[in-house]
Image (tube, rainbow, N blue to C red):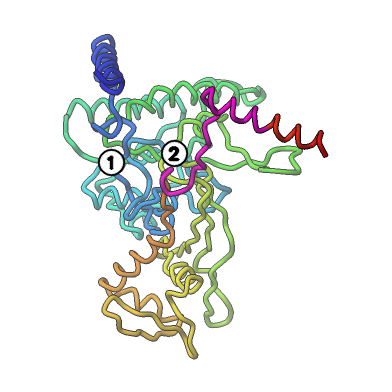
Amino acid sequence: MSKKTIKNDLALSLAETLNKKFKTEGQVAYFIGGEVTPTDVKEWISTSSPILDLAISNRPHGGIPVGRITELNGLEASGKSLIAGHILAETQRLGGVAVFIDTENALSQDFLEAIGVDVSKMLYVQLDTAESIFEAIEHIIGVAREANIDRLVTIVVDSFAGASTVAEMEGDYDKDGWATGKAIILSKGFRKITRLIGKERIAVLATNQLRDKLGVMFGDKFTTSGGKALGFHASVRIRLKLMGQIVKKVTGGKEVIGVKVNAQVIKNRVGPPFKIALFDVYFDRGIDDSEHWLQIFKDNDIVIRSNPGSKIINQSGEEIKFLNEEWSDVLKDVDLKEFLYGKLCDLLIMKYKSKDDGLDIEIPTITENEDDIEKKEDDIEKKEDDIVEE
């Protein structure tokens, strides 16, 4: 019997005994690659920005992972609730249930409808404390499991920064020191739900507020409220930053109709981290990253600058000329947009390399047999004799 066979038999035996030992918890031992495991991401929900979807998932038609926790953090008015709304709209489009847990009492129904959310079918839950948020999430998981209906559920918590604790709500205004208690509660809550949602078609998206670190002059000057529990348990952390305003000329002056947003994936356990996505947010319709497609294509010579405007070769090999302001009309061609999306994927998806591709350096063995050692010693002695004779 070969060593490989012995190892395989041992692994199978270990898997069987572990699953038997912990049978009350269901299957616990898996062979990755040979069967579906709780760590596999089998489904993704789009953020409505294809560039951001690629930055998170590193695959076509990706987005935030189902069965995992995703954190969106940023300063005020950076677009956190907006992206959350787009994800709820996409959940409904996929036939899933959208749940919005509100701790800030700041939900805009009109804006949710503008970006495609059917608010009549969205479950709105208003809660005040971190304890009640986790109890609600556990209840949703339990109901979904008991119903045994294979249906997607997305839970948005907006936000943990706005959530209090029971002790804080019952305490006096002149007392301080609730931050430590909140961090402990968040740590305990995320430990409980992280494993539970991994076995269900449930995605949890939590927004969080950035705050300044006092006295920090170098490095990251921002931190998030509630300790480090959310950042630790989140598989994906996205930080949003405003880059400027989108202005439209109107009679008598200018009007701000949107903002430019920089989204950096500062933590990623489902793809390469630290990727950056740029997109525009329009106040009347939400996210639009089409202009950034154009810039990426220009930087990679897929769109050629000409005078006037630009030109591109379509899927049929035909040349299409257009002005920059006509780019959104160019993308209205569904077949052309799908063709260009393939080009975008080729440019933005990182290809993983194996050892055979030359990424790893082969380390030579240092084990030598006795004949090789004796030969080297003889060569050294000969060189020493030559030096003495000279």
Q: Position of residue 192 (x, y in %)?
A: 39, 22
Question: What range of the chain is rendered magenta?
Answer: 354-379
Q: Does the image show residue 25?
A: no
Query: In whole angstroms, how far apart are the C-alphas of marks 2 and 1?
Result: 14 Å
Task: Tell me which corner region of the image, top left, top right, bottom left or bottom right, holds residue 127.
Answer: top left
Q: Position of residue 119 (x, y in %)?
A: 29, 50
Going by the image, does 16 lie left or right of 231? left
Compared with 56, 280 (above or below) is below
**Front residue of 55 and 145:** 55
Residue visible at 42% across and 74% down in the picture: 302
Residue 42's label in the rendered image is 1
The answer to whether the residues at label 2 and label 1 have Cβ atoms under 8 Å apart is no
**Front residue of 389 and 330:** 389
Quadrant of the frame with the N terminus: top left
Task: Tell me which corner region of the image, top left, top right, bottom left or bottom right, holds residue 341.
Answer: bottom left
Residue density around tag 2, few if under 14, some if 14–19, many if 20 or more, within 10 Å: some
Q: Which residue is tagged 2?
A: 269
- In the rendered image, residue 104 lying in the magenta stretch gets the answer no
**Front residue of 363 and 83:** 363
- In the rendered image, residue 368 lying in the magenta stretch gets the answer yes
Residue that protrudes farthest toward the front in the picture: 389
Q: Position of residue 181 (x, y in %)?
A: 56, 21
Residue 390's label in the rendered image is none
Q: Position of residue 364 (x, y in %)?
A: 53, 36
Going by the image, does 97 lie left or right of 103? left
Quadrant of the frame with the C terminus: top right
Earlier residue among tags 2 and 1? 1
Residue density around tag 1, few if under 14, some if 14–19, many if 20 or more, within 10 Å: few
Q: Mark 2 is on which residue type? A: Arg
Q: Mark 1 is on which residue type? A: Lys
